[in-house]
Image: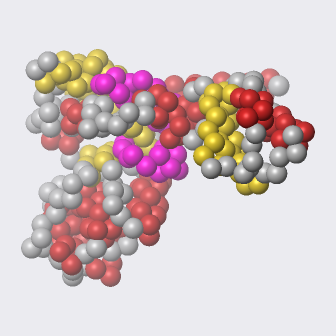
């Protein structure tokens, strides 16, 4: 027992003392009457993949642009590698790689020439650059397309080229903004595996996406931003423990009488009940054991049911409960 507590405390202490490569304190950015980022604090620890999530208009992109000094902040502090970030902090910027959602490559250059050009903005030595370009090509699996120009590439290949251009100089920090938007499953898988490899090779990564399964797969820690503020942070499991929903049960039953529906709706801790053409969905809060209670109820009422399924809350459930289900522009 003592050894177990020691290991838990040791892990907490180790996490507390991990180096912050990015440290944001009290960040504020306003557009006239709109406060896009509102007194925001953010830490990015060395070696982690941090998921940065938020609905449209949450301040997520503005936060990233302020961190990079692409936008001038109104107040607050942004330190990267222990130094205050500024628009002319080129010694810091050369250690960062950024891959924005909008593809930014040169149509007149080949795949190889594009990667070599962007790498050359940071690396002057030709032999070193040649090795780095080869590494980037290997990472995104574009070796068979080195002589292709961007207009000849599919959407997925173009995304992979965009990533290669952003990471070719082997940056210590990489910011990836929606890198898998509108790509085929094969390219998406390639990109995600490549990001894992970048992290294993030592890069610290900030990852934004609207695909919650990607964030769950990749990220060590997750920060959710809404209305310019951090509203939740932690590991995926910690975030799932924060919300009220604890268990989702679904099943198919073609004949549910009003009496049976009333009995189901009377089950303890039932948050919601939905019955569409015999496809029933139940959400429960707190505790467990609801499945056995439901089965007992259905059996006692001689209900024929099928496709019974039980799920724990997903990261998507967390996101929707914390930020709301209303559409954002």
Residue, x 46% and y 41% (percent of image)?
48
Q: Is residue 27 above or below residue 188?
A: above
Q: Position of residue 132 (x, y in %)?
A: 29, 65
Residue, x 55% and y 31% (percent of image)?
239
Q: Nearer the viewer, residue 35 or 292?
A: 292
| Residue 4 visible | no
Describe residue 186's horizontal placement relative to residue 57 as left or right.
Answer: right
Describe residue 117's horizontal placement relative to residue 260 as left or right.
Answer: left
| Residue 119 visible | yes
Quadrant (top left, top right, bottom left, bottom right) of the C terminus: top left
Q: Position of residue 144 (x, y in %)?
A: 32, 82
Describe residue 9's horizontal placement relative to residue 170 as left or right.
Answer: right
Q: Nearer the viewer, residue 210 or 262?
A: 262
The residue furthest right is 300
Residue 244: image quadrant is: top right
Describe residue 294's horizontal placement relative to residue 126 as left or right.
Answer: right
Quadrant (top left, top right, bottom left, bottom right) of the N terminus: top right
Residue 163: image quadrant is: bottom left
The residue furthest front is 258
Q: Nearer the viewer, residue 281 or 82?
A: 281
Does the magenta segment cover residue 218?
yes
Q: Is residue 234 above or below residue 51?
A: above
Residue, x 25% and y 75% (percent of image)?
153
Residue 249: image quadrant is: top right
Task: Find the magenta span and give its range.
Answer: 206-234
Residue, x 10% and y 36% (percent of image)?
88
How many discs appear? 0
Q: What colour scheme does the image use?
A: secondary structure
């Amino acid at each position: 027992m003592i050894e177990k507590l020691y290991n838990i405390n040791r892990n907490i202490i180790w996490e507390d003392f991990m180096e912050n490569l990015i440290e944001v304190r009290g960040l504020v950015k306003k557009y006239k009457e709109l406060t896009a980022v509102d007194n925001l604090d953010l830490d990015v620890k060395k070696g982690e993949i941090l998921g940065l999530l938020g609905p449209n208009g949450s301040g997520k992109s503005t936060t990233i642009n302020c961190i990079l000094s692409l936008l001038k902040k109104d107040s607050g502090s942004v330190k990267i590698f222990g130094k205050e970030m500024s628009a002319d902090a080129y010694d810091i910027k050369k250690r960062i790689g950024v891959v924005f959602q909008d593809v930014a490559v040169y149509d007149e250059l080949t795949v190889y020439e594009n990667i070599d050009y962007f790498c050359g903005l940071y690396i002057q030595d030709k032999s070193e650059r040649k090795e780095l370009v080869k590494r980037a090509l290997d990472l995104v699996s574009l070796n068979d397309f080195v002589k292709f120009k961007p207009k000849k590439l599919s959407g997925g290949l173009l995304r992979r080229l965009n990533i290669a251009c952003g990471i070719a100089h082997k940056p210590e920090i990489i910011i990836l903004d929606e890198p898998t938007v509108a790509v085929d499953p094969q390219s998406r898988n390639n990109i995600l595996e490549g990001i894992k490899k970048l992290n294993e090779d030592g890069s610290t990564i900030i990852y934004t996406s609207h695909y919650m399964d990607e964030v769950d797969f990749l990220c060590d820690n997750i920060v959710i931003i809404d209305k310019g503020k951090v509203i939740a942070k932690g590991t995926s499991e910690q975030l799932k423990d924060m919300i009220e929903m604890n268990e989702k049960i679904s099943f198919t039953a073609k004949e549910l009488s009003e009496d049976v529906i009333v009995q189901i709706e009377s089950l303890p801790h039932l948050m919601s009940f939905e019955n569409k053409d015999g496809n029933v969905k139940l959400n429960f809060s707190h505790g467990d054991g609801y499945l056995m209670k439901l089965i007992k109820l259905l059996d006692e009422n001689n209900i024929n049911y099928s496709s019974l399924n039980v799920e724990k809350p997903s990261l998507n459930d967390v996101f929707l409960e914390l930020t709301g289900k209303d559409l954002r522009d």
